[in-house]
Image (cartoon, rainbow, N blue to C red):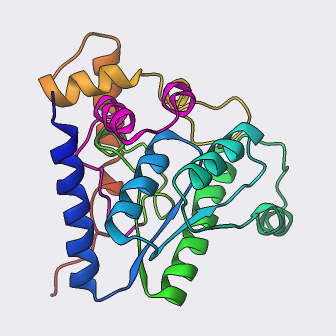
Amino acid sequence: MRNWEKETERIVSWIQEKVREAQVQGVVFGMSGGIDSSVIAVLAKKACGPHILGLVMPCYSIKQDFDDAMEVVHLFSIPHRVIPLEKPFDSFLEVFGEDPSSHALSIANLKPRLRMCALYYFANKLNYLVCGSSNRSELAVGYFTKFGDGAVDIAPIAHLTKSEVRGLAVYLGIPSRIIGKPPSAGLWPGQTDEGEMGVPYEKIDDFILRGTTEEPYLSRIKAMVDKSQHKQRLPLTLSPS
C-alpha cells in the first residue's frame, strides 16, 4: 500500500521540475469527468497553482461526464475553458463523407485527436506543457489513441495502475461518484473501457504487478500488448545508407 501523501508530494515535485526544465509557465490538461483527468487536475493545481488550464471539450459527450468535470472544476477551483468540438467533428465527417451515427473506431478516434489539437493550441498560446492523464494500465496494453490522448508532454500518473489511481483519488478528495463510475473514453454512447477492451482493469493490473493473470484474460492482454507496439515507440526510420 502506497503512502498517498508522500506519493502526491513526489508527483507534484516532478511536475514542477518538468515545468522548470521546459522553461514554461504551467500546464494545460483535458477534463473528461473521469477519475484520471480529475486526479491530474488536482495534482496540477497543487503543482502550479493558478498557472494551469483545464479544458472541458464536449463532443457529443454524455451530459453526466460534463457535469462531473464541472463539479471538479468548482470543487477545486480549477481555471478552465469549455471548448465544444461538435462543429469541427461534424465538419470532418462531412468532408470524409462519413455517417455521423457510425461507431467505427476511425471516427471515434477523431474526438481525442481534435482534443489534442485544442490542448496544444492553448499550450502554445500560454507557454504551457500538455499534461496527460494516461495511467500505467492503459499504457501497458496500448489503450489510448495514437496522436490523440497519447500525444502529451508529461504524464504524471503513468507509473500508477488503475487501482492505484483510485487510491490516490480517494486521498485527493475526488467525488466518490467519479471514482466509482465505469471508466469510459466517451467515444460513443454506452462505451466503456473494459467493455471495449474485453478485459477488466483488475486483470490488467494483475498482469502488470504479478506478470500473469488467468485465462481468457491473459491471452487477450498479450494480444493487446503485441498489437500496440507501434504506439509505444518513435516512428520507425531507415538507417543511413
Q: Is residue 6 left or right of residue 115?
A: left
Count of picture labels: 0
Q: Is residue 241 left or right of residue 44?
A: left
Residue 63 appears at what percent x and percent y? 77, 41
**Looking at the image, residue 1 lies above or below residue 109:** above
Q: Is residue 157 magenta?
A: yes
Residue 190 appears at what percent x and percent y? 70, 29
Q: Is residue 154 magenta?
A: yes
Tell me if residue 83 can be seen: yes
Write the start and end of the magenta stretch as one range: 152-181
Residue 16 appears at what percent x and percent y? 25, 72
**Looking at the image, residue 98 lies above or below residue 135:** below
Residue situated in front as seen by the camera: 198 or 98? 198
Please state, as top left, top right, bottom left or bottom right, where the N terminus lies in the image.
Answer: top left
Name the residue rendered at 57%, 68% in the picture.
79
Please state, as top left, top right, bottom left or bottom right, where the C terminus lies in the image.
Answer: bottom left
Residue 53 appears at what percent x and percent y? 53, 70
Name the residue rendered at 57%, 36% in the picture.
184
Tell me if residue 133 can be seen: no
Q: Is residue 1 left or right of residue 190?
A: left
